[in-house]
Image (tube, rainbow, N blue to C red):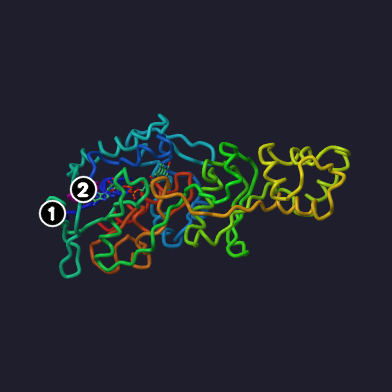
């Protein structure tokens, strides 16, 4: 059987490898001058290629369409990915949070190992080959047309074109156009695992400040729609970023940003009552000291001034003179420091795309289109995305393996 694979990224290369191993003829079409351009920048150049957790833990990290992804995860999980790369001669190591990296800390080792094996299996790798159209006859995919007009006929077509983040790596959303032209529904692509751009000007002076052991929750018109885990975040020049912020972005990107308030809980370990009592005790021990001293015992110094302004309490006010309302107001702000969301950072800076080809029209067992026979979608082009930790590359590899099982 002759198979055209559109896109030589993580999913396209893995599909090419697993299908070529079965003796099929593969044409791998990549519009860049090299394979896996995005892989080079993954994991800050170290490539966090998977996460060595159990199936259920893995699925808990999939934000959209975990149920659809489940059969791919069962078929080809993180152990399978690790086995493939170790067989390819890439020793791996497991770090904090079960994140798996090449022992060399070089993402290039992952791409090169895949490329070497593809060449060994005589995969016809074509660089600078941009696919413009998917050819379909009698509702069966039968080839592709390149931007130079060349037509390549095949018995099946696999679309592995990625999402739309970091478009300089080649992921420019072409797969969505192909899918749409063939009648597929596209769930609107949104940036995920991205920083949040915040409207409030009073936090600009905090740029560079990082916070540990805080929690975020997000309100839409007063109703809490998401609560993050406790973790780290930091203030940037135009908003907030860091681990819990990235996780939050993936969970709120299908809401209208203008309706959302991002609230920081500076004291997630204490409920309102316990925090009020702690402040009462602080006030007793600080005696004649000023409000600034009370704040500095509770928060980084640079935030104290912003709290005082928002609470409309003078920093020089004696703690003993704080009214009950003022003390309650302080508790409320420590538990819910409200920021107005402008938007989630754009596709140029987001790590993954949420949205894409609607999975209701894709067969979960082999990634084949339910609308067009012998047409497959794998990797980030699908409406499946996950949190950081190696989960997104594993989605690319697992969906590639499900697709390969059909050949
Ligand atoms: C900065 C950054 C860091 C990341 N770090 C990690 C990490 O450490 N761990 C992790 O799990 N995930 C990470 N990710 C996410 C991960 O890289 C992606 O989810 C994954 O690469 C998706 O694989 P893919 O094969 O679906 O798409 P891609 O890797 O985007 O590959 C798609 C390929 O298709 C080609 N293409 C597109 N259109 C056409 C066309 N018309 N014709 C021919 N070729 C075409 C593109 O040039 C590209 O090479 C990171 C992402 C970014 C941006």
Q: Residue 342: image x %, image y %?
A: 51, 54
Give the CA distance from mark 1 to mark 2: 10 Å
Residue under the point 46% across and 34% down:
93
- What residue sits 67% from the left and 41% below the top? 303
Depth order, front residue of 15/170: 170
Q: Position of residue 63 (x, y in %)?
A: 48, 56
Give, as a single range, the part of the protein colored magenta.
20-27
| Residues packed near mark 2 inside 10 Å, few (<14), some (14 to 19) or many (20 plus) | many
In the figure, is residue 74 to the left or right of 285? left
Relative image position of residue 361 (x, y in whole percent):
34, 67
Q: For residue 341, what is the image quadrant? A: bottom right
Q: Is residue 291 left or right of residue 158?
A: right
Q: Is residue 169 magenta?
A: no
Q: In the current view of this chain or complex, which residue is farthest to the left? A: 150
Answer left or right for 106 relative to 293. left
Which residue lies at the image location 30% right of the left edge and 36% below the top edge?
Answer: 113
Considering the numbered disc 2 on the image, is that residue within a helix, a strand or a loop? strand
Residue in the picture at 37% in, 49% down: 165
The response on whether ligand 1 sits within 8 Å of label 2 is yes
Q: Are marks 1 and 2 in contact (CB under 8 Å)?
A: yes
- Residue 377, quarter of picture: bottom left
Label 1 sits on residue = 152
Mark 1 lies within 8 Å of ligand 1 (Cβ measured): no
Q: Quadrant of the N terminus?
A: bottom left
N-terminal of the pair, mark 1 or mark 2, is 2
Assign the C terminus to one quadrant of the image.
bottom left
Give the residue number, with chain letter if any, for mark 2.
29
Q: Is residue 44 above or below residue 228?
A: above
Tell me: 83 left or right of 209.
left
Question: Secondary structure beneath disc 1?
Answer: strand
- Percent from the top left, x then y, of residue 17? 27, 45
């Amino acid at each position: 059987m002759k198979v055209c694979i559109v896109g030589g990224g993580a999913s396209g290369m893995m599909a090419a490898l697993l299908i070529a191993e079965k003796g099929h003829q593969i044409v791998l079409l990549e519009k860049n001058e090299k394979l896996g351009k995005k892989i080079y920048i993954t994991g800050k150049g170290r490539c966090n290629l998977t996460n060595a957790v159990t199936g259920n833990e893995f699925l808990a990290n999939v934000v959209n369409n975990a149920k659809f992804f489940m059969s791919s995860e069962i078929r080809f999980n993180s152990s399978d990915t690790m086995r493939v790369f170790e067989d390819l001669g890439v020793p791996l190591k497991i770090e904090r949070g079960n994140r798996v990296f090449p022992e060399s800390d070089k993402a290039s080792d992952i791409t090169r190992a895949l490329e070497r094996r593809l060449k060994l299996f005589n995969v016809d790798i074509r660089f600078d080959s941009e696919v413009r159209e998917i050819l379909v006859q009698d509702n069966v995919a039968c080839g592709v047309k390149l931007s130079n007009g060349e037509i390549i006929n095949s018995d099946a077509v696999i679309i592995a074109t990625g999402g739309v983040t970091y478009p300089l790596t080649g992921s420019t959303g072409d797969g969505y156009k192909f899918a749409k032209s063939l009648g597929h529904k596209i769930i609107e692509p949104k940036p995920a695992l991205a920083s949040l751009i915040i409207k409030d000007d009073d936090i600009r002076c905090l740029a560079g400040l990082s916070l540990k052991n805080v929690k975020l929750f997000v309100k839409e018109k007063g109703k809490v729609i998401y609560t993050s885990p406790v973790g780290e975040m930091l203030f940037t020049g135009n908003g907030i970023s860091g681990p819990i912020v990235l996780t939050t972005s993936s969970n709120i990107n299908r809401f209208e940003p203008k309706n959302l308030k991002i609230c920081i809980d500076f004291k997630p370990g204490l409920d309102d009552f316990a925090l009020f009592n702690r402040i009462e005790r602080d006030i007793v021990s600080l005696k004649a000291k000023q409000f600034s001293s009370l704040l500095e015992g509770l928060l980084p110094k640079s935030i104290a001034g912003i709290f005082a302004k928002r609470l409309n309490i003078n920093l020089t006010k004696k703690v003993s003179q704080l009214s009950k309302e003022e003390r309650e107001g302080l508790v409320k702000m420590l538990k819910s420091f409200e920021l107005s969301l402008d938007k989630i950072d754009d596709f140029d800076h987001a790590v993954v795309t949420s949205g894409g080809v609607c999975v209701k029209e894709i067969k979960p067992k082999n990634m084949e289109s339910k609308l067009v026979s012998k047409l497959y979608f794998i990797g980030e082009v699908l409406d499946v995305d996950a949190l950081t930790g190696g989960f997104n590359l594993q989605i690319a590899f697992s969906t590639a393996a499900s697709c390969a099982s059909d050949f």
